[in-house]
Image (cartoon, rainbow, N blue to C red):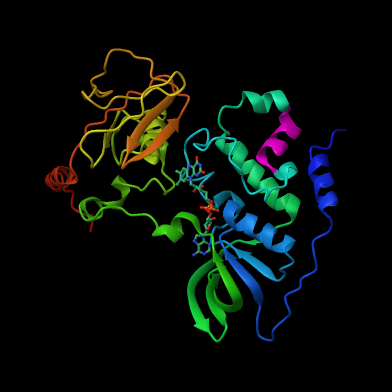
Amino acid sequence: MNDPDAHARTALRLIGPDPQNWVPDRPGIDHNVMIVGGGQSGSAFAFALRRAGIGKIAVIDMAADEARAGVWLNAARMNVLRTPKTLPGPECGIAALSFQAWYEARNGEAAYAAVERIPRAAWAEYLAWYRRFLGIPVRYRTRLLRIEPAERYFRVHLEVEGVEAIETARKIILANGVAGNGGTYVPPALTEGLPPHLYAHTADAIDFAGLRGKKVAVVGGAASAFDAAGVALEAGAASVDLFARRAGSRHRPPTASSPSISRSPAPATSSSPAPARNWPSSLTTSCYGATATSHRPTSKIPILAPILTSARLTNILKKRRVRRPI
Ligand SMILES: Cc1cc2nc3c(=O)[nH]c(=O)nc-3n(C[C@H](O)[C@H](O)[C@H](O)COP(=O)(O)OP(=O)(O)OC[C@H]3O[C@@H](n4cnc5c(N)ncnc54)[C@H](O)[C@@H]3O)c2cc1C
């Protein structure tokens, strides 16, 4: 039987065993390096440090388990990655550990050549393989609460399975993704004006099935917004309106593979349907100067994208203010 990991195994054999840990132990130090976040960045750091002969590394992640960590099986709702498949990943220069090698070993070279962009679920599966194959242990249910500097090391305040604990580390790598970039934000106009069951952030686990027949507003006009709009429509939402802060839009010129959706003049909503129109399989918009591409294989996505200023949106929300349940 074919072993899909044969090439990867050979590559590891040829680079030789992991170097011994050359970092001298220090009394009272639990970890030479604590990596916060077990996603692709944290996992790649763990492997690279090990290959550099740095032992006593801990990788922690606040998620309950691998499937609930990071975005790929959670907040990311596009079907394929937005990054080109040719960009390097966490393979640390070892080609046999790359996504391409992993994918070809399972599906063949022709299948990889046929892939335009990496399917999101395949990427998540590859990352799980990467951790398992390279033996990178991630301590899930372990959340970083606070970093306290001590003399030439850190006291790391954690919540481990709901219980507070302190461990010590000489160095810390923050690979905590979106949470490390300020986290998510819901404008006060929503949090103060609507009961919690009427809004959600795209980072939340959203009950899209519950939106069947509902009119949905999506605040934001970039990648996650289009993904959420697409999923809501696929789940049977009556209409979806996208609201973007910036007046006007800067679209990439349409190409054969990724034509743009024009946001002006505003098309009809799906509740007052526009003439049947085949939306492209790849929708492109640009926002805040960055280009974002939403790849959903939906053939008909009637997305309404009125452009409103945030002040006007706030006024509208205020007028519709719903009292919080007591
Ligand atoms: C909707 C969406 C779509 C995206 N699409 C793409 C794309 O197509 N291509 C692309 O290159 N990038 C994309 N990104 C960006 C993507 O998040 C990163 O490229 C990738 O996940 C970064 O990996 P990471 O390991 O740095 O972070 P993550 O994969 O986010 O991992 C961070 C980990 O840190 C953990 N963590 C956070 N805070 C703590 C804490 N206090 N204590 C312990 N653990 C903690 C989290 O649980 C998480 O598992 C997308 C992001 C989003 C939100």
Q: Residue at x 46, y 28 (%)?
A: 296
Image position of 234 (left or right of 9): left
Residue 39 seen in this snapshot: no
Q: Residue at x 36, y 29 (%)?
A: 252
Q: Can you name the residue that lies furthest to the right here?
A: 1
- Quadrant where the C terminus sits is bottom left
Q: Position of residue 111 (x, y in %)?
A: 68, 25
20 relative to 281, above or below: below
- The one nearer the camera, 276 or 15, is 15
* Quarter holding residue 217: top left
- The one nearer the camera, 90 or 207, is 90
Is residue 300 one of those drawn in magenta? no
187 relative to 52, above or below: above
Q: Position of residue 179 (x, y in %)?
A: 44, 58
* Magenta-tinted stretch: 98-108
Is residue 102 one of those drawn in magenta? yes
Residue 48 seen in this snapshot: yes
Magenta span: predominant SS is: helix
Q: Residue at x 32, y 23 (%)?
A: 302
277 relative to 31, above or below: above
* Quarter holding residue 214: top left
Q: Residue at x 67, y 51 (%)?
A: 92
